[in-house]
Image (cartoon, rainbow, N blue to C red):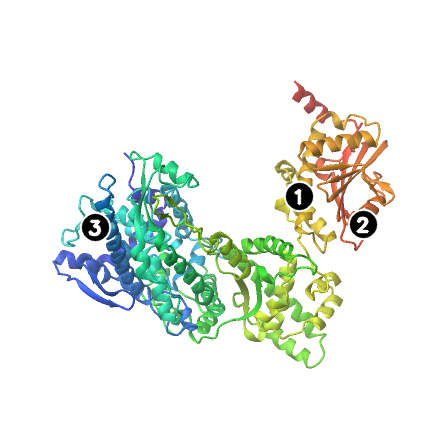
Amino acid sequence: MERSLAIQLKDRLPSLTQSVHDLMTQWLQPLKVRLDQGVETRPKQVNDPIWGTVDLFSWEVAFLDTPFLQRLRGVKQLGLAQLVFPSANHDRLEHVVGVVGAVETMLDALGRRISKWNISHVDDLLPEITQNQKYIYRLAALLHDTGHGPFSHAIEPVLENQTGGANPLAPWKKELRDAQLLLRRIYPQNDMPSISEVLAVLFVLSQPMRTILAHDRLLMPRGSLDAEQFQEHLAAAILGAVSGPGASHLSQVLSSQIDADKLDYLSRDAHHSGLEIGFDTDRLLSKIEILKMTEQNLDPSLSDLIERANAQATRSILQIGIAASGFGSFEQMLIGRTFLYDRLYHHHKVRAAEAMAQRLVLAAEEERGKPFSLKEMFVPFGDESILQVFAGNLTSSQIELKPGRSRRLASGLLNRDLLHRAFAFRGRFIDCPPGLSDEQKEDIRREKWAVVARDLSALATRIEVASEIHALSLEIGTSLATDVGTPEQSKVASMQAELQTIGAEELIVDIPAKKADAIRILARFPTGTIRVPEFSFNPVKWTDAYDLQKRTGYVFCPRSLVPLVSLAAKLIFLRRYGVVMGPDADGYIKMTQDHTAWLEILRQRELLDHTAIELLTRKRHQLLTIRSEKLGIPKDWLGQDPDLDVKLTEDINRVLQAGLTHEDAEAFYKVMGAMFNIVDHWYGTGLVTEALENEAALQKHIRSFLEMNRINVKEGAEMSGGELDLLAEGRVIVENKFESNVETNATAKAAGMQARRYAMALSSQLTIVIVAVRYRAGEMLEKTKAISVGPIVNGENRVALRIVLPHGSPLPSREKAQKKARKV
C-alpha cells in the first residue's frame, strides 16, 4: 500500500516536520479546546474592498480565529513596500479572506459555464462542481499563505539560503530544500514549489491539523474523504497540482496562469498602492471555463498534453482555460502584472528595504552564534513589532538576540533611513563598442547579462560580492585618504572613517528574481480546437526583453559612502564579470562624482592598471570575455588538473583585454572543442610515436580531425604575401609548425611572425599554432600541459594558443605497458 503524503514527508524531513508539529500544536490548541468544550462558532460576513461581501462558513471562522491565521494580521502583504507607498499597508490576513471570495466567485463562474456546456453537449458532459469541492478550495484559499514568515516574500531568500554563513546550517532549514525536491517529484506536472508553499503544505498536512479536521464538532462536511485525504486535497490545491495525491483540475483555481490568488493580489495591491492597472476582472471571470482536452481537439503542437490525455483511461484531461473571446482581458491582466512589478514590487526603495531585512536576519544570527529556529522565524506578532525587537526597543522571550550591528539595520527600517543606490546594473546598461549594429550589441549584452544575473541569483553569492566591494572600498579609501588634495582629502578621510565603523551587512548587492513565467494559457476557439492563443505581443520574447531592458540590480550603501562604494562596485564588476556599465547607469543612481582623478591615483598605487582605467572611463570598450564553462575542456583533463579551466580562461582574457565579438567567441568555442578532441585522439593513438615526414603531413592530420569534428575549414588561402595553413570557421587561424629534430621542453619553438601578418590581414584575433615536436624519452609533455597561451604581439588584443603534439617520441615504459594492455 502506498504511503500517505504526510508519512512520506515525515520520513524524509524529520527535523522540519517535528518543528512544524510543535508550531501547529501551539497554534491550534485554542481551537481544539473550544471544540472539545462544544463552544459554537457562527458564520460571518466580511466586507472586502475588492470582492464586496465575503461570506465565511463557521469552520472557516473557527480557523480564522486561531493564532495560526491571526499571525497573518501582522504580516504585510507587500513586505516593506509601505515605506515607499504609505497606503500599501494591507496584510496577508486581508488577502487570504479576499482569495476565499475570489475562489467562490471563480467557482460560480466555472459552474455557470459548465452548465451551459452540458446543455448543448449531452454526449460530452463536463463534471459539475460539487459543494464539497467548494469547501476544499475555499479552505485551501484561507490557508494558502500560512507559509509566509515576517516581511512576506522578502524573507524567502534567507530561508532558501543553504550556506549557513558563520553558523552551521539549521537542520530544518536544510530540509526545506529537500522538501521542495520531494514535492516536485510527488507532483511531477508542477514547477518547483516556493518556500512559502512548502511550509503551507507542511502545516496543512500536520497531525494537529488532522486532529482538528477529524473533530466531529468542527461541523465541516468532508463528503467521502477522511481527514487525511482531505489534507492531501488541501495540499494539492495550495500547489495547484493537476496530478498526484489529492490533485484535481480544480486545483488550478488557486494556483495557475489564471487563478483566484493572482486575481486578488493584483487588484488589491494596485488598490492599496494607488496604482491603476485597468484590467476587467468581471469579464475575465465570465470567460474562464473547463477545457476537456483530447488528441482530437488539441492543437498538434501541444504534444505533451496529447501524451497525457492518451495516458488516461478516458483518453482526456481537464484543465482551466478561457474562451477565445476572453483573450483580450487575459492580456490586460498580464500587462497590469508587469506594470506592478516595474512600479511597485521592484521599486528601488522597496528593493533596498527588503534587502536590508534579509541582511538584518542573517546578521542577527551571526551575532547570537546560532541559526534561528522555525518557531523564532514564525513568531506570533507583526512585522513592526519584530523590527522593534531587533532594534532593541522591545524585548521578547520568543526571540533570542544579542546586541550588534543588526540593530542599525532594524532602526534604519523603522525610521525609513534606507540605504541608497551606489551602483546600478542592468543588461541594457552594459557598455558596448561604437560602430556595432543594434543586433550585435544586444547579443553581447544578453550573453554578459546572463552570466551576471545567474551568478547573483543566489543570496550567498550576493553576500560574497558585497563583501568584496566592502573590502575594496576600504582599500581604495586608504589609498585616496593620503593622496587626494584638500578638500577631497577631508571628504575621503570622512568616508574611510565611516566605512571602518560599519560591517559588510550595510553594503548590499541586490537583484530581483526573474519573473519570466512561460505563458501557456489555453483557449477554446469557435471551431472547437484548443490551443495557445496568439498574443498581440510575443510573451516569451517580451519577458526576455524585460529581463534585459528593465530588470535592474543595485549595490546599496549609506548615502555618505556612495562615491567610494560606487567606484569599488564598478571595479569588482569589471574584475568578476568583465562588464562596464554605460553612462545611463550613473544617471540612474543620480551619480555626480567624477572618478577620473581617483582612478589615476589608484593606478599609481597599482590598485588598477591603465587598461582598467580606459575601460571604466569608456575610452576602451570591452566585448565578450571567454567563459571557462564554454571552452569544452574534457572532464578527464580537469581530473588531472582541476584548475586548468580557470588558468586557461584567465590567460586568454588577460591577452584579449578588449574581448571578442559574439561571432568570434562562438567560433572560438567550437574550434577549441575540436582541438581538445584532437589532442585526446593524438595522445590516445600511435600518433605520439609515429614520426611525421613534414609539415604537410601534420596539416593533413589536423584538417582531417577538424572536419571530423564538423569544423568548416579552408586551406591554403593566399594572404598578405604568404599562404595561410588553415582557416577554421572563417575566423580562427590555424598555423602548423613541424620540428623534425629531437627537442626538449625548454627548446621547442613557437610560431613565427607570419601569424601576426595573417591575423592583421584577416582582422582575426584568434590564432592556434600547432607544433609537432619530437621529444627525448621521459620528457614528453602531459596533454594537460600541451596548451599554452600568449599574445601574438603585446597590446594588440590578438591571442595565440600554442598546442604541442609529440611525434616520433619514445613512450615511457609505463605508457608502453598501458598501450599494450589496451591492444590486448
The amino acid type found where label 3 is placed reads Thr
The amino acid type found where label 1 is placed reads Tyr
Q: Which residue position is annotated with label 2?
A: 760
Q: Nearer the viewer, mark 3 or mark 2?
A: 2
Residue 199 sits above or below residue 188 on the image: below
How many neighbours does mark 3 have within 10 angstroms: few (below 14), some (14-19), or many (20 or more)?
A: some
The amino acid type found where label 2 is placed reads Met
* Residue 127 visible somewhere in the drawing: no
Point out residue 493 in the picture as x, y percentages from the top left corner.
64, 76
Q: Secondary structure at mark 1?
A: helix
Point out residue 385 in the picture as x, y percentages from the top left corner.
35, 70
How many neighbours does mark 2 have within 10 angstroms: few (below 14), some (14-19), or many (20 or more)?
A: some
Instruction: Give the residue displayed 69% in from the left and 44% down from the top.
Output: 668
**In the rendered view, does 162 fall on the left or right side of 573?**
left
Distance from Cα at disc 1 to Cα at disc 3: 61 Å
Distance from Cα at disc 2 to Cα at disc 1: 21 Å
**In the rendered view, does 605 fall on the left or right side of 201?**
right
Q: Which residue position is annotated with label 1?
A: 669
Q: Nearer the viewer, mark 2 or mark 1?
A: 2
Question: Which mark, by number, is residue 211?
Answer: 3
Instruction: Give the residue displayed 27% in from the left and 58% down from the top.
Output: 142
**In the rendered view, does 243 fall on the left or right side of 83?**
left
Foreground residue among 678 and 213: 678
**In the rendered view, does 200 fall on the left or right side of 415?**
left
Specify which label sits upstream in the sequence, 1 or 3.
3
Q: Secondary structure at mark 3?
A: helix
Point out residue 679 in the picture as x, y percentages from the top left corner.
71, 34
